[in-house]
Amino acid sequence: MTAADHVARAAEPLPDEGEAASRSPVDARPDARPRGERAGAGDGAPASETAGAGEPSGMAGARVSAGDSNPFHRRLSARDGRRLIRRVRLELFGALALANLVGAALVVVCIAWVLPGSPPGGLSTRLLVTNAILGGAFGLVVLPAAIVWGEAWLRGGRKWIQEGRDPTDREVTAVLRSPMRLFLVHATAWLVAAGLFALLNALIDVDLLPRVAFTITLGGFTTSAFAYLLAERILRPLAREALSIRTVERPKLPGVVTRTLLGWTLGTGVPLAGLAITAIFALTQDDSSATPLAVTMLVLAGVGLVVGWWVTVLGARAVADPVSSLRWGIGQIAEGHLETRVEVYDGSVLGLLQAGFNDMATGLEERERLRDLYGRQVGQDVAEGSLDRGVQLGGEVRQVAVLFVDVVGSTHIASDLPAQEVVDLLNRFFGVVVDEVHAHGGWINKFQGDATLAVFGAPADVEDAAGCALATARAVAARLPAEVPELGAGVGVAFGSAVAGNIGNERRFEFTVIGDPVNEASRLTELSKTYDPMVLASADAVLAASPEEAARWQPCGEAELRGRTRTTQLARPTSLA
């Protein structure tokens, strides 16, 4: 990209909010605080090189797609870092050189032909020769010194990326303050030029002293500020790389207020000051006429409009780009894409907002993961209900159906197989049970070693809880021999009143079900291991079920279960289908 292209691209109109929000997100996920891996496209190319065609610099790559499979940007190698540095240096040198050449040309035109009191035929040969000699000397002495000065400041902020390592706090600060330091270099060079050229021209014509001094000073200030805004945009890839590894605690660049005032100063203040100075020069000239004064006003107004528009666009985009990325990120978070991150490339308070957004998104993502894990551990119904119940202990009496599933011969399996194989086998076994319990609206209360306790009717109400539990028992007994033939399991179902609620202490408690149906289901499971298929239910559960489900069960006698004072009427399925 040439310098002219970069300046023209920087002056492109701001995208509206809808367009900004719909752009394709690219790379970079910065976290807050020092970190090891950076967000990005993951291909080793500098982040800014992945921008879409025609997308303004800073907007492309300003986001992390919520759907990115690999949102983390791998660290740039030393080779890639050097390539990035070369590209940025070329763009920066070209853009700043063009800005200064245009500024110098405008200053010469204003002094020679625009301001009141200019010689009718322009500058004399003596003035031209004298200023040409001084300009050559200035270019051979002052400009190289300014370039060396600026390069020395910039070198401190890019050494880390050339070496392929993490930046130190000082190096991050150097990267972020590079635009301001370049502004100081430019302003110093222009002030030196104003002093030298004003004094030299005053030796030839004293009337030129104020004209040269004021014109070069105003032109230099405008050019320096314009160079600052250009440098801030061109150096964004370096700032993006640095801030994706290490964030800052305090702003390192001017904030929104300062940038707004800078835009007003350059777009409005400087042109008005130029008009005021023109009026003063006109009043001091006895032979001032309306035509030269009108030409002066038109030229100054035109320059003010063009320069002011450019500066305003650059200043506005310096604020709008981070805000647009934040707006996009907030929209993604609102849609549930909690993995969304925005790039941090601004050294002002806007950069702190970007880093703060990423911290917030990280916290929300962690909380959502905890919520998801909690729901998987205790069940979604319990997890959602815990928000309403809080830490209140105790519970309520409910009519529930209890399903108990227990592995046959687990002791021998544990002694014959390695522990990891036992775990894998049990996980396959529990997978079948969990599938069927959830499919029938039940809740897994707990896994007890090689057994599972499921409840229907608590914590959420279930229509025909007994029927759902009985259907689950048949389905589990049908699937286990086919899918987990290594394990046999007894299944028991009971129905009755139980207390469902928080049991324990305010410091540590769990939601569970306590009552006679739980004990009865456990004993039925033990007894079922002597039947084929190994499935038993209490007659109370069958009577409480819907007629369709009850028809699939038949009485099979009675038994006095261990730990119970009354006889239990038994039922078994007529078929598992």
Image: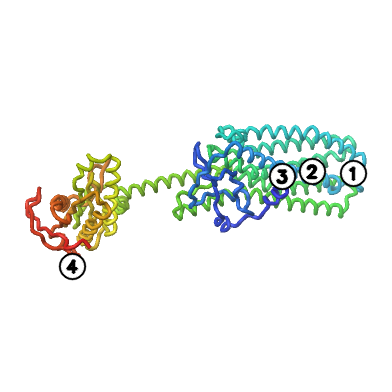
* SS for callout 4: helix
* Lower sequence index among marks 2 and 4: 2
Q: Nearer the viewer, mark 3 or mark 1?
A: 3
* SS for callout 2: helix
Badge 3 local density, few (<14 within 10 Å), some, or many (20+)? many
Residue pictured at 22% horizontal, 61% vertical: 471
Considering only vertical position in the picture, is 42 above or below 291? above
* Lower sequence index among marks 1 and 2: 2
Q: Nearer the viewer, mark 1 or mark 2?
A: 2
Badge 2 local density, few (<14 within 10 Å), some, or many (20+)? some
Cα distance, mark 4 to mark 1?
111 Å
Tell me, yes or no, if residue 444 can be seen here.
yes
* SS for callout 1: loop
Q: Nearer the viewer, mark 4 or mark 1?
A: 4
Coordinates of residue 165 in the picture (x, y in percent): 56, 34
Task: Provide the residue designation for mark 3.
Answer: 95
The amino acid marked with disc number 2 is: Ala
Closest to the observer, 17 or 281: 17
Task: Provide the residue designation for mark 2.
Answer: 104
Cα distance, mark 2 to mark 3?
14 Å
Label of residue 519 in the image: none
Coordinates of residue 414 in the picture (x, y in percent): 23, 41
Closest to the observer, 117 or 421: 421
The amino acid marked with disc number 3 is: Ala
Give yes or no for contact between labels 2 and 4 (Cβ–Cβ under 8 Å).
no
Task: Provide the residue designation for mark 4.
Answer: 547
* Lower sequence index among marks 2 and 3: 3
Task: Provide the residue designation for mark 1.
Answer: 123
